[in-house]
Amino acid sequence: MLALRKTAPSPGLWLGEISEPVADPGEVLIEVAAAGICGTDLHIADWSGGYEAMAAAMPVTLGHEFVGRVLHRGEGAGGIAVGTRVVVRPSVVCGRCERCRSGRAEDCITRTGIGIARNGGFATLAAVPAENCIALPDELDDAVAALAEPMTVSTESVDTGGVKPGDTVLVIGPGTIGQGAALAAEAAGAGRVVVAGRNDSVRLGTVEALGFPDTVDTAGTTLREALTRAGLPVAYDVIVEAAGAPAVVPEAIDLLALRGVLVICGIHSRPAPIDLTAVVRRHQQIRGSYRSPLATWPRVIAFMAAQQGRIRRMISEEVPLAAGLDAFARASNRTASKIVLRP
Ligand SMILES: [Zn+2]
Ligand SMILES: [Zn+2]
């Protein structure tokens, strides 16, 4: 079968034929229908740092945002019937550690990621633990459903920020996580949602197509200046940083309202310089946000089914897996927003 893999701890990806997987005990075999390329995959492809631990798993098939149909059940893989359409949660947890036993499985100490530390969905077939599969409602399309994992990350950022009805919210970073954060903030009742990017016209166009006209591109200027010029607010109750750009963090703090909350969900390659005394005097909070709890998934899937027409606009291209290497190149240079591979 065809698979897109990371084969060595250096820049680059490999696309080619490998043998088909089998479902081990407790696993199911999935015929993959749609798998999204995400920023994590781009970091791994470029080998730009932060994923060194993956080397032990190589060669490994990438793809952690995917949907498919259950083809076969391994021994003892109960619960989900053959033929069911499912989305795969990428976190494989032990179920035994103190965190798993106290209902915080998303923080499991031995957590491994499907598509990172074990084979994922950029392939015709994938063998995954049955308990990682969540059945999809019939009305939710495969390609749209492949956005469920990033949508849970976006939703977690808005939940972490505690967005309340009427809040003024700024999202920095117009990629898929930022787009999802704008949708989740609106769903939480935000009174105004502004989205900022830098040299990012294609993805800001996607944000506008999602129904958020208040966007700014900070190319050649500061965030405050760009907002002022556009006649947009310069004080926000909640700011979600989904750009992974350290320089933007002090700019975000400067735009935070008294007692405001800055949520960081970007992955930063360097420390950010911040004026903590200003944060203290203005009684502000900085919170990190990463994986969502399991309980968020059904809520996000129901939201996606209800908002399918809008969420579909987040997908800029659907391409065959065989054209996956070119698709990675377009995703890297931001000429595409979300690309979904169709094995
Ligand atoms: Zn992802
Ligand atoms: Zn555990």
Image (cartoon, grey):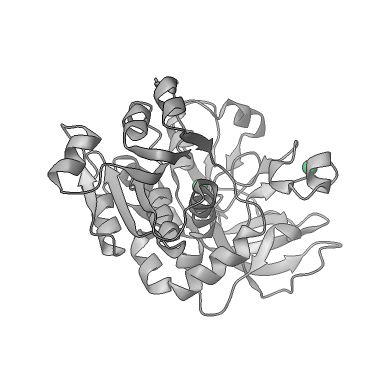
Where in the figure is residue 263, as x and y percent of width and height?
Answer: 47, 40
Above or below: residue 224 compared with residue 151? above
Asked if residue 292 can be seen in this view, the reply is yes
Where in the figure is residue 31, as x and y percent of width and height?
Answer: 61, 65
Viewer-nearest residue: 283 or 255 = 283
For this view, does 247 lie left or right of residue 156? left
Asked if residue 141 can be seen in this view, the reply is no
For this view, does 33 lie left or right of residue 106? left
Viewer-nearest residue: 109 or 62 = 109
For this view, does 337 lie left or right of residue 9? left
Where in the figure is residue 182, as x and y percent of width and height?
Answer: 38, 55
Residue at image coords 34%, 40%: 332
Tell me how many marks there are. Answer: 0
Residue at image coords 75%, 37%: 110
Q: Residue furthest left?
A: 229
Viewer-nearest residue: 302 or 120 = 302
- Quadrant containing the N terminus in the rendered view: bottom right
Residue at image coords 30%, 49%: 195
Q: Quadrant of ligand 2?
A: top right
Res 117 quadrant in image: top right
Where in the figure is residue 123, as x and y percent of width and height?
Answer: 55, 54
Residue at image coords 35%, 27%: 250
Above or below: residue 261 compared with residue 248? below
Q: Residue furthest bottom?
A: 138
